[in-house]
Structures are given as structure tokens and as C-alpha cells.
Image: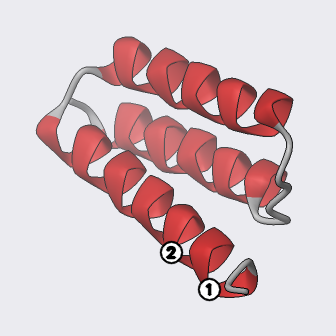
């Protein structure tokens, strides 16, 4: 992977994070989140990309659970 490709990957992941950082409880949010993460992974298909996306997904899930504790 070239430095330009790495830059594009990190840019795509940042845009993904920024788009979904305001977590919502509706199913459409979560379906779109997974669909977009999958698109990014399929575009780059690297271990780093996968790990970064999974960490973001884990973080969003953790925040959602913490905010929705009864």
C-alpha cells in the first residue's frame, strides 16, 4: 500500500467516524454504520483497516450501552 493509499484509507475512516459519532438508537443508524464500515474494508482489505474499523465499532457500541443504561 502506498502512502497515498494509506492517506485515503485514514481519510475514509475519519469521515466514517465523523459521520457516525453521534450515536442513535434506531436500527437504520446501525445498519448504515455496518454497511459503510464494510464498504471501507472491502475497498482497502488490510489488517490495519479492519482493526481500526472494529475499534471504532466497539467504541460506538460501548458508548451506546453506557448512555442507555437504565
Q: CA distance from mark 2 to mark 1?
A: 6 Å
* 35 or 66: nearer the viewer: 66
Image spot of residue 49 (x, y percent): 30, 41
Residue at horizontal 53 percent and vertical 63 percent from the top = 61
Q: Which residue in the protein does label 2 denote?
A: 62
Image spot of residue 31 (x, y percent): 68, 25
Decide if residue 14 is on the left or right side of residue 58: right
* 23 or 12: nearer the viewer: 23
User: Looking at the rendering, in which quadrant would you find the N terminus?
Assistant: top left
Mark 1 crowdedness (10 Å alpha carbons): few <14, some 14-19, many ≥20: few
Residue at horizontal 73 percent and vertical 77 percent from the top = 68
Looking at the image, residue 37 lies above or below residue 52:
above
Image spot of residue 30 (x, y percent): 69, 37
Q: Secondary structure under badge 1?
A: helix
Decide if residue 33 is on the left or right side of residue 46: right
Q: Which residue in the protein does label 1 denote?
A: 66
Residue at horizontal 24 percent and vertical 51 percent from the top = 51
Amino acid at each position: 500500500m502506498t502512502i497515498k493509499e494509506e492517506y485515503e484509507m485514514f481519510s475514509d475512516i475519519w469521515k466514517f467516524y465523523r459521520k457516525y459519532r453521534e450515536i442513535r438508537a434506531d436500527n437504520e443508524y446501525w445498519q448504515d454504520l455496518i454497511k459503510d464500515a464494510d464498504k471501507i474494508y472491502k475497498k482497502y482489505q488490510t489488517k490495519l483497516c479492519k482493526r481500526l474499523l472494529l475499534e471504532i465499532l466497539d467504541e460506538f457500541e460501548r458508548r451506546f450501552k453506557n448512555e442507555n443504561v437504565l
